[in-house]
Image (cartoon, rainbow, N blue to C red):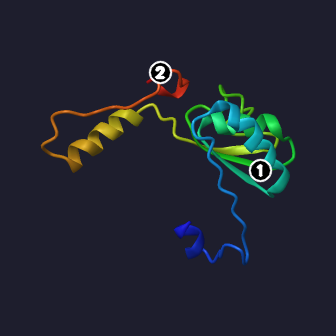
Amino acid sequence: MDELAKQGYVEGENIEIDLQNAQGEQRNLKTISQQLAESSDVVLAIARPSAQSLANTTQTTPVIFSAVIDPVSAKLVESREHPGGNVTGTSDQSSDAISTQINLIKKVLLKAKTIGILYTQSEPNSVV
């Protein structure tokens, strides 16, 4: 929200934001997706489940996703180079993502000997 303000957007003046949270419940995604697609000029989906739900809900409202490891295998886009349709976004997939993170941890926390990793086993993007 701060970045939107820096770019000159003011809630209620020149932009309306409908921020929704499925609270981790997959069954809420369809209802929220329908509401957002019907009432928004563009929708932002954070993570694969939200992106897939929105992409399956609308073929007309632009859907922009983030935090999706592989949008092609998630069937969100036809290809990275030519997404096709009304869905596009950014991927955090990188062949060296883990090593880059470890190197950053080493630089920031010189004395770190233990690193905790949190992931969800049921999410395909957790497999590295």
Q: Quadrant of residue 53?
A: top right
Query: Residue 86 at what x, y percent from top left?
Result: 80, 44
Residue, x 58% and y 40% (percent of image)?
23
Point out the image quarter for the C terminus. Answer: top left
Crowding at dot 1, Cα within 10 Å, few <14 / some 14-19 / many 20+, comes out as many
Q: Amino acid at mark 2?
A: Gln
User: Alpha carbon of mark 2 to alpha carbon of mark 1: how far?
Assistant: 29 Å
Query: Residue 36 at what x, y percent from top left?
Result: 77, 50
Q: Which residue is mark 1?
A: 36
Residue closest to the eye, 62 or 90:
62
Residue, x 41% and y 36% (percent of image)?
97
Q: Is residue 65 visible?
A: yes
Q: Amino acid at mark 1?
A: Leu
Residue closest to the eye, 39 or 4:
39
Q: Quadrant of residue 59?
A: top right
Image side of residue 2 versus residue 71, left or right: left
| Chain-order first, disc 2 or disc 1 | 1
Secondary structure of the residue carrying numbered label 2: loop
Report the disc number at residue 121. Answer: 2
Residue, x 72% and y 70% (percent of image)?
15
Secondary structure of the residue carrying numbered label 1: helix
Query: Residue 71 at what x, y percent from top left?
Result: 64, 33
Crowding at dot 2, Cα within 10 Å, few <14 / some 14-19 / many 20+, comes out as few
Residue closest to the eye, 83 or 57:
57
Q: Quadrant of residue 65?
A: top right
